[in-house]
Amino acid sequence: MGSRVGIAMNLTQPLHKACRERPAATATISGGRRQSWQQLAERVARLAGVLRAAGLQAGDRVGILGLNSARYLECLYATWWVGGVINPINTRWTAPEIAASLDDCATRLLLIDAEFRHLLEPIRSHSRCLDCVLDTGGEASAGAPAYEDLLAGAVPMADVWRGGSDLAALLYTGGTTGRPKGVMLSHDNLAINALAALAAAPRLSSPVALHVAPLFHVGGLSFLLQLASRLPCHVMMSSFEPAAALRLIEQERVTECFLVPTMIQRLLAAPDFERHDLSSLHTLIYGAAPIDPVLQGQLRQQLPAVGLVQAYGQTEAAPVVTILGAEHHEARGPYPGKVASAGRPIGITELCILGASGAEQPVGEAGEICVRGPTLMQGYWGQPELTAATLRDGWLHTGDVGHLDEDGFLYVVDRLKDMIITGGENVYSVEVEKVLLGHPAVGLCAVIGVPDDRWGERVHALVVRHPGLAVSANELLQHCRLQLAGYKCPRSVEFRSDLPLSAAGKLLKHLVRASFWQDRPRHIG
Amino acid sequence: MGSRVGIAMNLTQPLHKACRERPAATATISGGRRQSWQQLAERVARLAGVLRAAGLQAGDRVGILGLNSARYLECLYATWWVGGVINPINTRWTAPEIAASLDDCATRLLLIDAEFRHLLEPIRSHSRCLDCVLDTGGEASAGAPAYEDLLAGAVPMADVWRGGSDLAALLYTGGTTGRPKGVMLSHDNLAINALAALAAAPRLSSPVALHVAPLFHVGGLSFLLQLASRLPCHVMMSSFEPAAALRLIEQERVTECFLVPTMIQRLLAAPDFERHDLSSLHTLIYGAAPIDPVLQGQLRQQLPAVGLVQAYGQTEAAPVVTILGAEHHEARGPYPGKVASAGRPIGITELCILGASGAEQPVGEAGEICVRGPTLMQGYWGQPELTAATLRDGWLHTGDVGHLDEDGFLYVVDRLKDMIITGGENVYSVEVEKVLLGHPAVGLCAVIGVPDDRWGERVHALVVRHPGLAVSANELLQHCRLQLAGYKCPRSVEFRSDLPLSAAGKLLKHLVRASFWQDRPRHIG
């Protein structure tokens, strides 16, 4: 299967490894179908052949639009196998948003699942670059051969063994400027980060993993890579549904799972929770926010043997920055009382807190969280100035605000970047505000995150109408839905007669936000 | 402290990290003295300044001759800080052996501890390259300023941040050809291997580690690097002594230790073992050989809470190849009955077994153990042909013989290279045979390892004298001692009238060996 010489870390190696050490073991369980590592590798080599035949060259980007499935894994691995760069697409984005991220990095090839066929024409109409679409969704559709036919007819190719500083992924995050930001991550970035996250939070070998967090998110992708080298079995769920997740954990003896707190909550609250045997579960990794003490208490009662691991990070760091390990969740552990923190930096990562003047802050003093190490992104695609502003002297300026305690634990207290995290998705306020301001009746607006028991935060819009012009909350929501993914649209709209402005006319958003958060800490992760 | 931009893994990062996260915590305890991370980093920056002032350039080699101590750590880190390459010297070698390894890679600068001052003149007289010696051993000696004076007068320098594929270490292993082999390892090789070994065998954060295995050995060095990123406290022992080791484990609340089985045996047999509180001990890593079932039974009884971890590897793989984790040492673990194995390959490493024809062997069939991954050495210094013979198509041919079982566990059964492991030291038979054959009375000889309860194997020589020439065992040992390190010299000599030869006149060593090993498996690691 090709020859690997003189490269550092590489993302296809786990496939070669598993084929050598456990060829007949189950690699994926997806929609009731199982395949072995040998079978998976064979299909990856064929799909890589298909991509090559479609003209894909090393370094070219491949858009992937689909829900979690064995096919999604095949798309990821085949792209790396042929030397390409994955560009995973958030399935909640609208066609114009998708087209913008494809065009930003000149992605001309798209792998698309059946569920999203209806988006294809709108995407094509908005995109300048897209010129090749492969349907991965089962049966043939008009003008596209079925995925299985494609694979059956393909010539399997040898792994080209890209690796080291070669680009492996372009991950788009919403931008504060409106233009999407394509975070460039190399094989080294992603593979070293996964290894270090693993070393920081010990897990079982030969795990059975349940993939409910979407693989197009950097969190889901990182979870996959933290599993890859341990001869895992991947159980895929196309979307999160508590009853189905409980059934799969019991049936497949799942040992490891990555969830956002919202999902944990729904899992524990499922009506038939008590009827399932969940004794196989060993580790529950959660991200996006520290765990609420009430929820942690429920977990301790309902799943007492499960180790909790929190990861904090961001796409630009590939992504894990700190880990709060299982031993730090225990009241009798070596460091009780750290559960409100985001943990300590992983082994290869250094962290410092910089004050407004750029000086390093002492213990306990808040400032911008900056990180250094081998997992920092190569930059933002085609945006050298933004890259230079974010990566300075080898330090990534995260835009998050936090402080360290005397034991080196990090507490994340706020975001410099004006961002809302709702149900695990990041929403940049400015993007929503731009759309609202595009409505003729809106004179001034502020989009903020407000507390929400289910989603952590909820997108809330405060709007000052132009004198004499009328618009209803419903009309504004309709206006937003045409241009924004559903999760970015305000869940609630509140009309005000004015909003607090600085002497220079700048919106004082922290004052707007304060009244909503006075009773509770605003945790983020 | 300098700026890190665009490099992958780097061996000085843990120093920066610890200074940032735990500056006042104890970094080293050595000979009763403690120093913090802040102090250690300050001394490293000064020693680096001394090396720079002595003319050291990036990529230059630095010989280090000393026993375990805080100073030894300073020498390692200062060499990397200034961009140099460590060349750690086995303290048991004779002056001609040391000079040969210094000259092989043109090491002109030597850091030498007080204990070895008596070797300096003999080394100088044999070496062509050595032209600068810095005494790290305390008080000034004739012509050399004291170490503390050197540091006090130095200008601290900024880290040059070498890393990635830059060379970090030249580790000399005895050669089957007589010429020493300098294994070239990069920052990436060593740092990635340490991280992957850690991920494969979970350990505590903020460990307290006891260093008894010498740091000039790749095993001791790897143990250090597996600790480095976890904000450790290093407790140094200049040589292994069971009573002192027990005292230190109790006093300093040691959590982690790396030993060869011989040392474990002596520790458990110490007369005052029961009087010590060893409850802090969490992990015991052992190498060089699988653990004897009797010894394992003793461990389970005397230290029931301690997790055992076996590592198998070789210098050329930087060094860990497989790990047998604590859970695989347990009779009730997920894989009972694997304790005779060397475990499974670490996450980043692939392993295959090649038969004599070069084909991959099926499960259960023995062949040469070959490994692939980002930790393989860059090659042997100045020996391109030997390198090409050892690294073929990206695979390292280890020279060890083994087989895999159906769960991917490795069993090491023999060595292709004719090597003896005695008390954790490697002895190449051919080197000893060459010296014996240099004696005028020796006509034919075979040097083999024979079973030894204390050392695992013992160096044993079988000698056929030239007709009419007399020589005693004692005379032959005297002859060896002049040219070989003590551990390489035969412990016993046996005179024979003949030795089994093949039709082509080649010594059939496996026949010689067989009679000594018929009752017991010859484990190696």
Image (cartoon, coloured by chain):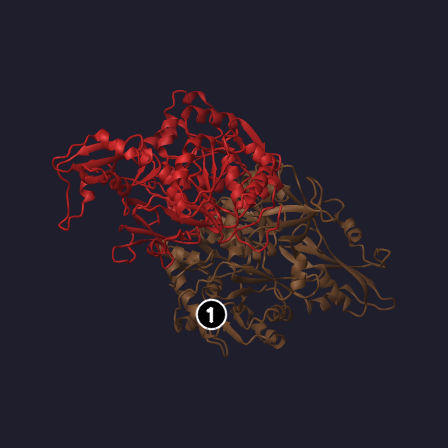
Chain colours: A red, B brown
Q: Is residue B430 above or below residue A1?
A: below
Task: Identify the residue at horizontal 51%, vertical 62% (top origin).
Answer: B166
Which residue is at 63% across, 75% downward?
A: B126
Give me the residue at 35% from left, 47% from top: A409
The answer to whether A408 appears left or right of A188 in the picture is left
In x, y percent, where is residue B391? 64, 56
| Residue A186 point in image, percent of width and height | 47, 50
> Does residue B212 appear in this view?
no
Q: Nearer the viewer, residue B231 or B394?
A: B394
The chain to which mark 1 is attached is B
Corner quadrant of residue B88: bottom right
Residue A263 left/right relative to B355: left
Q: Is residue B521 left or right of A136 when viewed as pictured?
A: right
Q: Nearer the viewer, residue A366 or A490?
A: A490
SS at mark 1 in the image: loop
Question: Is A171 left or right of A446, judged from the image as shown?
Answer: right
Q: Which quadrant of the structure image shows residue A268?
A: top left
Q: Residues within 10 Å of mark 1 (few under 14, many from 20)?
A: some
Q: Amino acid at mark 1?
A: Gly
Q: Nearer the viewer, residue A437 or A297?
A: A437
Image quarter (top left, top right, bottom left or bottom right) of the C terminus of chain A: top left
Residue occupying the point 54% across, 33% down = A145
Q: Position of residue B63 (x, y in %)?
A: 54, 68
Residue with the mark numbered 1 = B138
Count of numbered labels shown in the rendering: 1
Quadrant of image for the N terminus of chain A: top right
Q: In this view of the protein, which residue sits in the foreground, B378 or B434?
A: B378
Res. A107 visible in picture: yes
Residue B123: % across, % down:
60, 73
